[in-house]
Image (cartoon, rainbow, N blue to C red):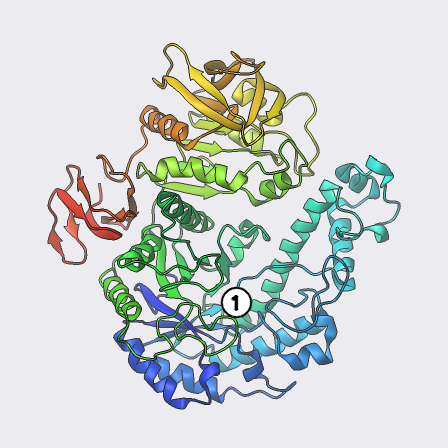
């Protein structure tokens, strides 16, 4: 159990991104918005995200009167504010007078003014200007009772290759490696005679220059994360100086690859993220639902299970996805409460009112261009607000999963840069998701964590394609397993260290002793090819039969492990495909080929039984129905979710449940309508 992120608002938050600066010439719009906000049961707005040009229309000329009016009137009407720093998009006058603030692309060409995040995090001018702006905001609004958090910038991302960034990268490299010998060894620059003889020769990867030194590519991505984090710290410094007690957050993005979010966790008071699933893809409705759940669990786990904030979602559709599809009736409440079920203490939208022009004029909003409350979307948003108002015991409640899946962004960078064995894709993200989905379908909570995190609180740790094993990680996994934990890994694991240098002495490198196998070769399959694995005889998981393998097949030798299943085809027919190694008090499993979701379901169902994993509800979950839990000191809150367009019947277990919305005892048998969710409460066991 955690405390609410801000004690001034110890309740579920409901609101949106609000851009009143777009409507300053229409003063009647703001007053109408205040009326509509009350009808929609909202209590928070994110304000000022892209307001720089209105706050500082000319260099050194500030206009805060309109913002004063907005924040004051919102507060008078019971609506708190996440006040943003406007660094996500600079005003035109700044780009014209100080072109150095604009980014330089990897081809070394400077951008023109435009877009968002088209700015250099290293530029002294840009840092000076954002410090001036944030100081003004802090001085004016830190003591305002309506401001409950700082919303820092918006969706950090991207990189700059200007001279300032090149110099900063050289200093970063020099600080990390100290000597040229250490740098040349880590980047293996004897390859193609690329040895550095001076730190002044170091530069970022470029399409017309160097892209094939994988250690350099990896360090550049690390530098971009560190430089972005340094800019974030620069942004919050004047805010902290004025009042260190106001929480700060920076909204993250769905399974975002560009930054290593793990690095930001300690500097955020609360994690927030922007969720835009592609609902109603009927080819894989479960896949969309479980993938979204995995993202929620990833962000919740960033701060050790502390509840996060759903900072953006759409109440209807987006305008930028390949297919911008409406939410069917019920899906808005279901998808909003799915975030709550996995740890969010808020439901917020982009956007409150649709823009009249420019690129997001057709992006979904609570208030449509028609401008009134008599729409389907507005009514469904109001229902979400009403439901959240009945969940005031939930803020701070969390979950302690017994299962962790390692999804590591540096590992992802290295995998995608590896050049082999399948350059058309080894599908790291999809593979991790398919392992996750097998637990989601059983109603077993999962943390999604980076490889450096502590493992001691888990019963089961799964590391699909742990290609990179940073220093100390192999030893940590070894200790976890020796102490009685169960570890699962797969093909293409234990291949390189943190510098993307291959381990010598045999794969899977530092995981070899724990897994008890040696990987000699790996075979890549064409998309039209497949192999199979066959369980023969009795095994500790009571699995039998044959399953499909696709894309990658690891050819391994048993050392201390024993085989549970064998390949069915090709020249390696009869060689081990699934193994288990008893190691200390625990066990380590190895999946030598890329298995399908059908195998994952059966494998993890049996593994859940043998490891004694607790399910949220100890009963059968119908197809497309899942159960999620959050707990406070006295009660468990159970979210039963139906992600199908069909009615589902489900029996509960032996606990006594109360419907949180009606506050009435529930029947032991639930009837779940299409795209519905029921929030139940039981005494904590």
Residue at the front extreme, as displayed: 528
Identified at 37% across, 35% down, the residue is 438
Q: Is residue 565 above or below residue 58?
A: above
**Where is residue 391, by image quadrant?**
bottom left
Task: Report whether 292 appears left or right of 376.
Answer: right
Observer able to see residue 245: yes
Give SS at disc 1.
loop
Position of residue 268 measured from the top left corner of the image (x, y, whole percent): 50, 59
Seen as rendered, the residue at the extreme top is: 537
Residue 317 percent across, percent down from the top left: 40, 63
Asked if residue 3 can be seen in this view, the reply is no
Q: Is disc 1 surrounded by few (<14), some (14 to 19) or many (20+) residues within 10 Å? A: many
Q: Nearer the viewer, residue 285 or 225?
A: 285
Measured as percent of width and height from the top left, residue 592 is found at 52, 23
* Image point (57%, 61%), residue name: 156
Horizontally, residue 353 falls left or right of residue 684, namely right
The quarter of the image holding the C terminus is top left
Residue shown at 47%/23% (left/top)? 588
Residue in view at x 64 percent, y 31 percent? 421
The picture quadrant where one finds residue 47 is: bottom left
| In this view, 569 is above or below 311 | above
On the rendered structure, is 336 left or right of 154? Answer: left
Question: Where's residue 534, x and y in %?
Answer: 43, 16
Mark 1 lies on residue: 152
Q: In this orientation, which residue lies closer to the viewer: 353 or 122?
A: 353
């Amino acid at each position: 159990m955690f405390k609410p992120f801000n004690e001034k608002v110890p309740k579920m938050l409901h609101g949106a991104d609000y851009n009143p600066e777009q409507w300053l010439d229409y003063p009647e719009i703001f007053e109408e918005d205040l009326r509509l906000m009350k009808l929609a049961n909202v209590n928070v707005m994110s304000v000022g995200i892209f307001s720089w040009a209105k706050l500082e229309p000319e260099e050194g000329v500030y206009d805060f009167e309109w913002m004063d009016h907005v924040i004051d009137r919102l507060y008078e009407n019971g609506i708190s504010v996440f006040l943003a720093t406007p660094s996500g998009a600079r005003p035109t006058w700044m780009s014209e007078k100080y072109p150095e603030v604009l980014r330089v692309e990897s081809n070394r060409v400077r951008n023109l003014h435009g877009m968002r995040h088209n700015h250099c995090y290293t530029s002294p001018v840009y840092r000076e200007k954002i410090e001036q702006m944030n100081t003004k905001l802090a001085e004016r609004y830190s003591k305002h009772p309506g401001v409950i958090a700082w919303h820092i910038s918006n969706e950090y991302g991207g990189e700059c290759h200007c001279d300032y960034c090149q110099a900063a990268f050289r200093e970063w490299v020099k600080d990390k490696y100290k000597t040229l010998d250490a740098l040349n060894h880590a980047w293996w620059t004897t390859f193609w005679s690329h040895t550095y003889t001076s730190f002044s020769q170091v530069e970022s990867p470029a399409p017309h220059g160097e892209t094939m030194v994988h250690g350099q590519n990896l360090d550049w991505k690390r530098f971009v994360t560190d430089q972005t984090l340094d800019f974030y710290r620069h942004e919050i410094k004047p805010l902290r100086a004025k009042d260190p007690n106001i929480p700060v957050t920076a909204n993250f993005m769905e399974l975002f690859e560009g930054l290593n979010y793990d690095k930001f966790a300690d500097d955020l008071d609360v994690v927030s993220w922007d969720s835009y699933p592609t609902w109603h893809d009927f080819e894989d409705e479960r896949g969309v639902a479980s993938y979204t759940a995995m993202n929620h669990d990833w962000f919740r786990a960033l701060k050790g299970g502390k509840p996060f904030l759903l900072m953006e979602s759409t109440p209807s559709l987006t305008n930028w996805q390949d297919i911008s599809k409406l939410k069917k009736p019920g899906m808005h409440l279901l998808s909003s409460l799915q975030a709550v079920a996995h740890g969010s203490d808020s439901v917020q939208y982009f956007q409150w009112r649709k823009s009249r022009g420019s690129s997001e004029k057709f992006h979904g909003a609570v208030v449509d261009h028609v401008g009134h409350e008599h729409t389907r979307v507005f009514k469904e948003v109001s229902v979400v607000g009403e439901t959240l108002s009945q969940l005031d015991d939930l803020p701070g409640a969390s979950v302690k999963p017994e299962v962790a899946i390692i999804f590591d962004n540096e590992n992802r960078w290295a995998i995608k840069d590896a050049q082999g064995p399948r350059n058309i894709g080894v599908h790291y993200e999809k593979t991790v998701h398919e392992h996750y989905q097998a637990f989601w379908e059983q109603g077993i909570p999962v943390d999604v964590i980076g490889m450096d995190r502590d493992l001691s609180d888990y019963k089961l740790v799964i590391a699909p394609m742990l290609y990179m094993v940073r220093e100390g990680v192999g030893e940590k996994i070894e200790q976890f397993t020796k102490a009685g934990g169960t570890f699962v890994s797969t093909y293409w694991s234990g291949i390189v260290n943190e510098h993307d240098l291959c381990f010598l002495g045999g794969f899977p490198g530092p995981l070899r002793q724990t897994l008890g196998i040696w990987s000699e070769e790996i075979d890549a399959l064409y998309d039209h090819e497949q192999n199979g694995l066959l369980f023969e005889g009795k095994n500790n998981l009571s699995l039998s039969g044959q399953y499909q393998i696709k894309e990658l097949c690891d050819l391994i030798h048993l050392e201390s492990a024993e085989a549970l299943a064998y390949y069915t085809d090709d020249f390696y027919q009869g060689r081990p495909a699934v193994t288990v190694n008893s190691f200390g008090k625990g066990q380590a499993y190895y999946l030598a080929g890329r298995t399908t979701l059908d195998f994952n379901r059966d494998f993890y169902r049996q593994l859940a039984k043998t490891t004694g994993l607790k399910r949220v509800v100890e009963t059968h979950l119908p197809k497309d129905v899942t159960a999620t839990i959050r707990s406070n000191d006295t009660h468990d809150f159970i979210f039963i979710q139906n992600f199908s367009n069909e009615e589902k019947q489900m029996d509960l277990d032996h606990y006594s449940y109360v419907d949180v919305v009606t506050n009435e005892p529930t029947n032991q048998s639930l009837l779940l309508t299409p795209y519905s969710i029921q929030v139940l409460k039981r005494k904590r066991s």
